[in-house]
Amino acid sequence: MISQIFILSTKGDHLIYKDYNIIMKPFRGEESKDSINGFYEMVTALSGDQPPVVMVNSGFLGELMSGLHFIHARQGGLYWVASTKTNPSPFTIIEFLNRLAALTKDYCGSLSEKSVRMNFALIYELLDEMVDFGYIQTTSTDILKNFIQTEAVSSKPFSLFDLSNVGLFGAETQQSKVAPSVAASRPIMSSRGEQGGKNEIFVDVIERLSVVIGSKGVLMKADIQGEIRIKCFLPTCSEMRIGLNEELSIGKSQLKGYSSAVRVDECRFHQAVKLDEFDTFRILKVCPSQGEQTVMQYQLCDELPCAPPFQLFPSVEKDYVNSYITTIVLYLCCSTALNVSITVPVPKGSTSMSQELSSPDQTAELQPKNKALLWEIPRFPGGAQLSALFKVDVPGLSSASLLEVGPVSMSFELPKQTCTGLQIRFLRLSPTQTGLSQRWVRYVTHSDSYTIRI
């Protein structure tokens, strides 16, 4: 039984607040609206970036709210919170909050503080249909679309030239056509006659790469977490068939065919996916509902089928009494990288920095509070080699201080490729859609943790 649901910004601003105590006040005398501020005080009082998902007030907020449970999820830079004094399953509440965030993204087009502020009436309507008297009723998009009447307000105008936000969906098709990066960042329910009402379906193959490379360039750790997501804007679709690599093998002992196999250690599927053709033909069958859902998750541990995307050659040497020079040579082994960021720890007490960068579009800055040097490259062409030289001033620099330099960490995005080699062979809809329907497929690899030791 949920007592309250509220959404907060990272600054503690109240964006959405729904109190189910008002309806049931004669039966449940529970917490007041002050619990919102109380939750934020508890979160900010904790050390670390990730507070516990479930927190219990044991006198921190006073006797009136003693024993109050807060269950929250962090999505889109916002806190999605439910409070209760009863003892419900926390996993049920967490799943509900994640579904609420996903539905908000589906109906509003994007998930951010701005989109929530602009669509507060729509979100309240969603909550009215999803929760009744504190009890969860439904989180199904197919059921909710029959009752939701409020139209979403787009938080960002459509632009063919805005390619700066390289987000999910908005993909390259198998026919080498490219959709705008914001093509799928629109509400699933659009006004008639608008461009956003086109019949489209987007499929993303997304991989997150975790790599540790030793000081001598030896690969020490490599893990890949991947998933296949779909976002459907089709009014009706009885079944969709997704064909994966025929040579895909699952587990180290399983091999298929005689060609170079694409291998993953394990995979999980959405409960709606039919697997009767998967073992033989590597075909997933699913009946997609409007909105976004993950149909498959997979992972590959302790192995990288391809070469690491970046080769980095750092060097550190003492210059004068109170300064040292760091030289970094960076080489990209794949086609193109976007939003590349290199972070190099610096000794405590670093005061200033001068740099020499190999191209004018790059930027670098010293962040004394974080004891780090940040080098950013918006676009890195494939096969290119970039270099940077940094001179950092450190009063009282010693040989021991130089040991604080490193390891180097990187974040980046690799469009149009996957490290495992997983590919979509075909994407077929049944029955055939009347009128023009477009199918988009995109591959993207993100860095989850990419570390190079010096």
Image (cartoon, rainbow, N blue to C red):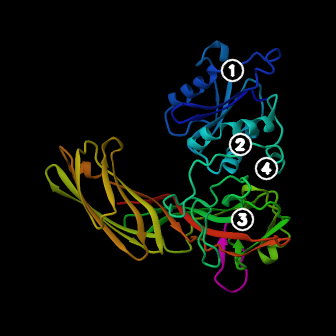
Q: Amino acid at mark 2?
A: Leu
From what the image shows, is residue 84 above or below residue 308?
above
Secondary structure, mark 3, is: strand
Query: In this image, 448 relative to 183: left or right?
Result: left
Secondary structure, mark 4, is: helix
Q: Amino acid at mark 4?
A: Thr
The answer, for residue 404, to whether it is visible in the render is no
Q: Identify which residue, 162 or 347, lies in the foreground.
A: 162
What residue span does the magenta drawing correspond to? Answer: 254-265
Judge depth for marks 2 and 4 and give the one in front: 4
Judge depth for marks 2 and 3 and give the one in front: 3
State the separation of the CA atoms marked 3 and 1. 46 Å
Q: Earlier in the sequence, mark 3 or mark 1?
A: 1
At 68% from the left edge and 52% from the top edge, which residue is drawn?
Answer: 187
Count the numbered circles shown: 4
Tell me which secondary structure the magenta stretch mostly adopts.
Answer: loop
Q: Identify which residue, 356 or 406, lies in the foreground.
A: 356
Residue 442, quarter of picture: bottom right
User: Outermost residue toward the left?
Assistant: 321
Query: In this image, 366 relative to 6: left or right?
Result: left
At 84% from the left edge and 66% from the top edge, which residue is drawn?
Answer: 239
Residue at which label 4 appears: 141
Secondary structure, mark 2, is: helix
State the separation of the CA atoms marked 1 and 2. 25 Å
Numbered circle sitting on residue 100:
2
Numbered circle sitting on residue 67:
1
Residue 304, quarter of picture: bottom right
